[in-house]
Amino acid sequence: MLYGYRNNISKEWQDRLNEHFETVYSPIVGKDAVPLVIHYQIEDWVGEEHFAEVSPYLFPEIKVLDVGSGFGGFVRALRKRNYEAFGVELSDFDAEFARYRVVQEVPDCNSNEIYNIGSALKLPFRSNSFDLVTFWHVIEHIDGIDKALSEACRVLKPGGRIVIVAPNYMAFRKEAHYHVQWAPYLPKGIASIYLRLRGRDPSFLQNYIHYVSKGSIRKKLKAHGLEIENETRSKIENPDAIGRNSVRKVIKILKQIGLSWFLYLYCDLKLWNPMSSTIRFSALKGEKDSNDCQ
């Protein structure tokens, strides 16, 4: 099957991607959903979305590491804007495509240096070398999250930031990879039967998905000495930093009529709500921590 691609991807790479997605993703999402997976994995909009999410943290000299950089969209979005960004990826195929694409966008770059093949459990970088380390929908695939966080802390500069976004397996939601309805911490034995009944191969669940929740990730971040930020509260304190004009106006009105307490209550509930569908944390390394956080 030939899927439609944009962004000037060569015919050779289109054929390779078609074969890759058919082989890897059809058993997980079903054949009909493969074009949606390609759209999510390959098109630029995901990298741009991640870029928008971290844009308040960026400054001209920032150095960024994306752990589990996949097909490279986030790093590419940063490189196009002249930020010093790097990726580390376990999959040779994904990294090879990322290198191919970044050269199209940033012709004079060293793509092999930008996209590194390696493990989150042993990052191929010096200590205290990055200002921002990101995990975009990656942490749930790591067998050894504590070790991955230790490595992230090691390469992070004092005062640097870790951003984690992942599906919350404590929530009632669609499973992020199989795209089927899912119950909180559904036992994997039962889940495997359920997936087979839905025509899906459960081996990806058994081998590559490690259930995480807001509570479990928050506990691990604190155990590593990282200070969790309340980003929504920060935006309320400085509404001019909010991109959407309508939201900015509502917040300013509520503050003017004395309902700041309601806004802060909402922020705290949003941050700590254990049942929200997505885990989203930003956490800071201490200014005095020179290597591992803890």
Image: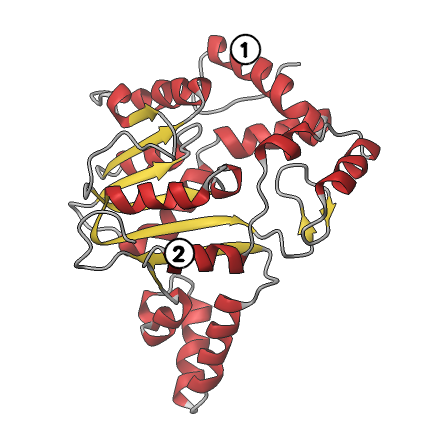
Residue 80 seen: no
Residue 15 is labelled as: 1
Quadrant assignment, res 34: top right
Q: Residue at x 80, y 39 (%)?
A: 194
Residue type at tag 1: Asp
Q: Position of residue 152 (x, y in %)?
A: 32, 43
Horizontally, residue 287 falls left or right of residue 200, namely left
Residue 151 seen: yes
Residue with the most extreme right position: 197
| Residue beneath disc 2 | 221
Q: Position of residue 110 (x, y in %)?
A: 22, 21
Q: Position of residue 116 (x, y in %)?
A: 32, 25
Horizontally, residue 99 falls left or right of residue 160, namely right
Residue type at tag 2: Leu
The image shows residue 27, relative to residue 172, as above or below, that is above
**Mark 1 to mark 2: distance in Å?**
41 Å
Q: Position of residue 17 (x, y in %)?
A: 53, 17
Q: Which type of secondary structure does the marked residue at label 1 adopt?
A: helix
Mark 2 neighbour class, 10 Å CA radius: few under 14, some 14 to 19, many 20 or more: many
